[in-house]
Amino acid sequence: MPSPPDALRRGPFRAGAFTSVLHEPRTTVVVGRWLGGALVVCFLTGLASHLLQDPPSWLAGHLPSRPVNGYRVTQGLHVISGLAAVPLVGAKLWAVYPRLFEWPPARSVLHALERLGIAVLVAATLLELFTGLLNTLQWYPWPFPFRQTHFWLGWLATGGLLIHLAVKAPLIAANWWRRAAPALAQRRAFLATTTAAVGAVTLVTAGQSVPWLRALDLLAPRRPDLGPQGLPVNRTAAQAGTVTVPADWRLRVDGPRPYQLTLAELGELPQYEVELPISCVEGWSAAARWTGVRVADLLTRAGAPAGTGVRVTSLEAEGPYRVMEMPAQYVDDPLSLLALRVNGEVLTADHGYPARIIAPNRPGVLQTKWVARIEVIGR
């Protein structure tokens, strides 16, 4: 491919336009491996979150109900690594941005395709981090669905990253361990500043999911210890239209022997107390003491055998999680309750009065509030 005329080399395209000695391979490789680690953790934990929240039919019956804090840990790591990646992306782009103005812009068809691939990688990564950050704030100023878009952007960014690593493997290998000049002192200062930025972002946001960092939770969107009954609320009763529960409310359990129970009758059944976290996709989590009736006991009374899944329907009139399916392994777990109380108090309307589901290792959106019906759906 013939070179463009030198007369076009103006502004950032001119020779010597960038003077910092840190725009070099060693700095790029060091920051890149930190960023790559953060993105891999973010992708794998995000994939775990997606599969727990919306599993394909072949996987739903094999998801584990233990460890009880599984989703709390993976989703906490997902948001922590995503936030840590923000300053790392900034440092990485700063180190390589003069390459955007390299001359000639495309030396061959393969070089042009490589640059196009990098553009897709950068665009997908920035959009993934930007939408994820706004999701932690529960702000969605775009017309497309967040969860599905975030999922596929993750695959696009990860695929682009793998291709980029394959193309740049010789350069990465040559600079992986090299510590010599040029710019050794400046590089150390730049990397120390980047490390400090990542550490600061992590320390002031991770407290929403890491209890022992809660005192430093200054910039995270949520304080997990603030809210009615000591727990945050994502969807209030007013938003769900369930502020007023019908005076004749009864829990309906449909199975081989269907029956209905009033709230007073539910309270007369054997009650169990468990300690389980509420863990939300936005990254925050908080443990609480829940008291109620085992879901398995309700199904046994309905004549359903062990190994039976259920469909749970909420009182709310509409919403993407108004109806929730719970596979058999969660139903049979003795920690899965139809909860009537939290932290020793009757549930408030915002926490799901008169009754809600609480089960181990499940996303918060699947811990259905304002339960009206539990229906046996088979094994």
Image: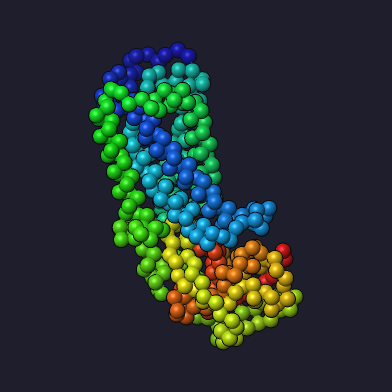
The answer to whether residue 379 of the structure is visible from this angle is yes
Q: Quadrant of the C terminus?
A: bottom right
Q: Is residue 241 visible?
A: no
Q: Whole-percent x and y of residue 210? A: 39, 58
- Above or below, 81 relative to 7: below
Residue in view at x 43 percent, y 42 percent:
38
Residue 101 at x, y percent in the picture = 36, 25
Q: Relative to residue 238, is residue 181 drawn left or right?
A: left
Apparent side of residue 41 relative to residue 224 in the rendered image (left or right): right
Does 300 appear above or below 140? Answer: below
Q: Name the residue at 48% across, 69% down.
A: 275
| x and y, in percent, of residue 112 in the image | 48, 23
Looking at the image, what colour scheme do you see? rainbow
- In this view, 342 is above or below 192: below
* Residue nearest the viewer, comparing 66 with 265: 66
Total marks placed? 0
289 relative to 149, above or below? below
Place of residue 82 in the rendered image (x, y in percent of width and height, measured from the top left)? 42, 47
Q: Hey, which residue is sitting farthest right in the picture? A: 256
Q: Is residue 187 left or right of residue 83?
A: left
Nearest the camera: 302 or 132? 302
Query: Which one is in front, 243 or 254?
Result: 254
Q: Looking at the image, which residue is at 48% across and 30% down?
A: 165
In this view, the residue in front, 255 or 115, is 255
Q: Residue at x 47, y 75 (%)?
A: 342
